[in-house]
Image (cartoon, grey):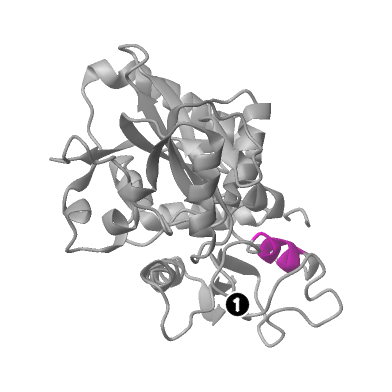
Amino acid sequence: MKILVAHSPLKEAASLDDADVLAQVRALAEAATRLGHHVQVRPWPDLALTPGAFSNGPGPFPDVAADLVVNLVESIQGSARHVHHVPAVLARHGLPSTGSPARALERSTSKLLAKIDLAEAGLPTPVWLDHQGRGNAVFPGTYIVKSVWEHASHGLDADNVLTVNGPEELRAAMGERQRNPGGEWFAEAYVPGREFNLALLADPDVNETPVQVLAPAEIRFLDFPEDQPQVVGFRAKWLEQSFEYRNTVRELEFPERDAPLLAELSGLALDCWRAFGLAGYARIDFRVDFRVDKRGRPWIIDVNANPCLSPDAGFQAALSASGLTFDAAVDRIFRTAAVPKEAA
């Protein structure tokens, strides 16, 4: 096949998380070449996207003949707010693309829309409050303030965790961050406890449940001071010299006593796949609260429809722990993408 790898348009002074997309581009392009495909790489046009974008034009890549587009567009004009239009635009121009369709990307990229969909599906998600006062938060309580649209721990660190007595304190904290990059902010109950990531990969060779839950991973917080919230924030993900980066490690082996918990997380991850209409690959993040009982109660804290595929990211670690090569995963993602996607 003729494969076009489309990625986020990058400025010269791109942030660390935006620049990481190039590592994914190299990994996908090399795997596609090894699988015998002809590969071209292009940045997505750095134009604001709306529902009608490119409706009357020749499309985003008029000079490229492609059978399939690998969608690695994670931000446009520095924001993830409109990336869900990318698969819709491609579908309108007859181009199948990898990953989730437009609706699934929109409902999962917006953490507020994701929480609404999780609640409607009866799936556990922490209580929340947005900057307009909407939500089901209870007070007093401890909350973590997050960007609604940005991922990769954008603007997130331990000082985003606040203990407040009422909604006005929390809305004031959101208002302070509103002036920073990241746009709209909201607050979600902070769940102390263990953090797990479960990656999912489509399996077109299986009819009944055409998706595989890969080996689970736990994020361990080593030697964190008792008064420091345990958060996989920007420092933990991107700043190699920071305490948080050096002391936040991924664990892929578990004792037998964790088997019931891991089976429950696996079932919830599949529920998310179905509820959001995810496709290709995804990752679901959990916090497990051991204050409630010894077994622990899992809470879904993120549904990521386009998790990082770079060689040092958790998705590739989960593939290895599951006995799968990256090339085998890419082959599955390509074959799944051959099914036409819905338009927005």
Q: Which residue is painted at 57% across and 46% down in the image?
A: 111
Q: Which residues are magenta?
A: 84-91
Would residue 67 be counted in the magenta stretch?
A: no
Left or right of residue 227, residue 133 in this image = right
Q: Position of residue 36 (x, y in %)?
A: 47, 70
267 vs 318: above or below: above
Main SS category, magenta section: helix
Front residue of 237/71: it is 237
251 vs 119: above or below: below
Q: Which residue is painted at 20% across and 63% down in the image?
A: 240
Helix, strand or loop status at disc 1: loop
* Residue 157 visible, this orientation: yes
Q: Position of residue 224 (x, y in %)?
A: 17, 41
Q: Position of residue 109 (x, y in %)?
A: 58, 52
Quadrant position of residue 291 = top left
Q: Which residue is painted at 56% across and 73% down in the image?
A: 6
Q: Where does the N terminus fall, quadrant-wise?
A: bottom right
Quadrant position of residue 163 = top left
Of all residues shown, which one is farthest toward the right? 56
Assess disc 1: are there few (<14), some (14-19) or many (≥20) residues with their C-alpha within 10 Å of its C-alpha: many
Residue of label 1: 44
Left or right of residue 183, residue 58 in this image = right
Please state the total of marks drawn on the protein image: 1
Q: Where does the C terminus fall, quadrant-wise?
A: bottom right
12 vs 39: above or below: below
Could you tell me the amino acid type at mark 1? Answer: Trp
